[in-house]
Amino acid sequence: MGIAASELCRHVIRPTLIYLGRHHPAAESFLLAVAASQSALGAELDTQRGHGLYSISDALHHKVWDEYLAKDPDLASLVRGLASQHAFLSGPDLELTVNLRYATAIAWLMVEASHLSLPAEDDLLGMARIWRRIFQPHGRLQDFTTAWQTSVRPLFQAEPAIL
């Protein structure tokens, strides 16, 4: 069993994006669908593909730090502020599994580092293409769209203020 989508959005994704100064409804919708498609909203936190809600591999995690955050010390400091004080130093990749806000920040920065523009929150196929390009190069677009339809769309119908 994973995390309730509304709780994940309200308590993890939205506050993290606000903290980073990157809040936008399309970003919330996208990250929620990525978490749904990558880990079934946290039901599978460690797989061969990667760690945490977004199944981020060690290599992609390091790439974000080495090629993106290293060029922006202020942003790097913000992200480092989300990480556990001691655990990050001994096992930074483990933070992706145990620290939801840190994992969310890294997932969003993977999107930023790609320099791809996130489509409108209702452009499901556009979001699926970005997901496949960044998170799941061999993934099927249908997997993302199904995850969005089952996890994200109900939030729009049940509680419009959630997203």
Image (cartoon, rainbow, N blue to C red):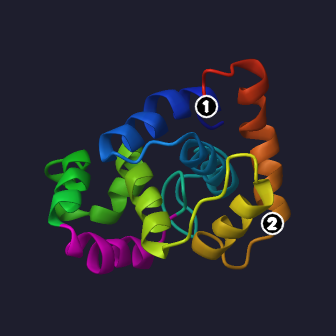
Instruction: Say whether residue 99 is magenta.
Output: no
What residue range appears in magenta? 56-72
Along the viewing direction, whichever of 72 and 39 lies nearer the viewer? 72
Where in the figure is residue 69, as x and y percent of width and height? 26, 69
Q: Quadrant of the C terminus?
A: top right
Please report the residue visible at 32 percent of the width from the left and 47 percent of the height from the top: 20
Where in the figure is residue 81, as x and y percent of width and height? 19, 48
Q: Is residue 15 above or below residue 74?
A: above
| Residue type at numbered disc 2 | Leu
> Disc 1 or 2, which lies upstream in sequence?
2
Q: Marks 1 and 2, how far apart in space?
A: 22 Å
Along the viewing direction, whichever of 55 and 152 lies nearer the viewer? 152
Q: Quadrant of the N terminus?
A: top right
Q: Is residue 31 above or below residue 50?
A: above
Lateral position of residue 26 relative to residue 87, left or right = right
Q: Give the residue at mark 2.
A: 141
| Residue type at numbered disc 1 | Leu
Where in the figure is residue 37, as x and y percent of width and height? 69, 54
Q: Give the residue at mark 1.
A: 163
Give the quarter of the image for residue 133: bottom right
**SS for tag 1?**
loop
